[in-house]
Image: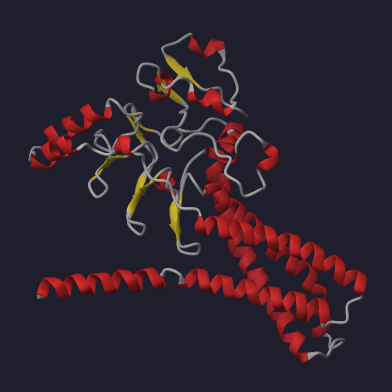
Amino acid sequence: MQTSCRMALSRGLRCCQRVLSWVPVVIISSVVLWSYYAYVWELCLECSLSLSLAAVYLLIFHIVFFLFAWTYWKAIFTPPTQPTKKFLLPYAEKERYDSEERPEVQRQILAEFAKKLPVYTRTGSGAIRFCDRCQVVKPDRCHHCSVCGMCVLKMDHHCPWVNNCIGFSNYKFFLLFLAYAMLYCSYIASTVFKYFLLYWTAELTNNRAKFHVLFLLFVSLMFFISLMFLFGYHCWLVGVNRTTLEAFSAPVFPSGSDKNGFHLGIRKNLEQVFGKRKRLWLIPVFTSIGDGLSFPMRMVSESQNPLLGRGNQWDDEGTDDENPGSHESSHIILEMDT
């Protein structure tokens, strides 16, 4: 009886948690819907704008609004990608691992299994990274999200404002969402400012429209400033090819910790997220390079680099040819862009 009560309570708490996790999304969506009404109806239709000026305002506004809403939708509803089944610890190894009490033997079991996998990063102690909850050997840059309850490929962070885990599958959409949200706020603020001054000097007297215009300016500026810092930070992360988690805790390689281990140069770093086709960079369609399971590294041992044994997978994505001169030593050094 007590067990069933605890299970029912646990299910109830999880249900409440899932419902409450949508509260930030509902708040943002409500603010956006109000801004749409306030701009289209109260500003463009109620403030006695000329027909031509209102048409121009509305045309540009709807283009920006569409791009902003599209990227926000993609950031919310694009599920994070999990490791494939080949990273799942087989039943026999799992039995051995769970029954073994000696940590060094457990590490050896994981090391033997990981020899068949393209994993290169390690824990701080040098062991294979393993998730006890998902029972998978973690691919490089993969982390377990306690909110989503699963391991996420190239996990950046869990964002409550989109109620989603940001990782390999949707990081581009998240960046575009921030960019178009800034554009949306800046466009509203720049076009509303003139009418804010007119209301302030009492040249316009529509009190209901006045309220909406004043709050449009205030809310758009407030969100723009907040988004500017967040977007700037993520631009820096993309430029150095790090995730938010890697910015706080540098990835560990067999040779040691290296915060710039995945830094390939600014151009190649951008292509890792946005792809090679620049005409698609600003459109929320998936164009990131790779499969999220393994990534090119700045400098790795030729005999240990898992990418070298995978048939030059990056050539399939249309990357530049390797520099022949880079094979003169025992290390593969990816050419750094300036």
Please tell me how many numbered marks the rendered image carries.
0
Percent across and percent down for residue 17 are 35, 70
Residue 237 picture location, percent across and down: 52, 44
Residue 304 image-quadrant placement: top left
Q: Is 284 located above or below residue 279 in the figure?
A: below
User: Closer to the camera, 263 or 96?
Assistant: 96
Q: In the rendered image of this protein, does residue 33 appear above or below residue 105? A: below
Q: Is residue 134 above or below residue 64?
A: above
Residue at position x 35%, y 46% in the image = 143
Figure quadrant of residue 107? top left
Query: Quick check: 93 left or right of 136?
Result: left
- Give above or below for 268 relative to 195: above
Q: Report the residue at 36% width, 16% height from top.
A: 303
- Outermost residue toward the top in this view: 328
Q: How is the image coloured?
A: secondary structure
Residue 136: give x, y in percent of width and height. 27, 41
Q: Quadrant of residue 287?
A: top right
Q: State which quarter of the image contains the C terminus.
A: top right
State whether residue 181 appears in this view: no
- Which residue corresponds to the image point at 67% horizontal and 47% vertical from the top-left? 282
Residue 154 in percent (x, y) is at 43, 43
Task: Give the residue drawn at x 50%, y 64%.
Answer: 161
For the N terminus, give its image quadrant: bottom left
Q: Is residue 8 visible?
A: yes
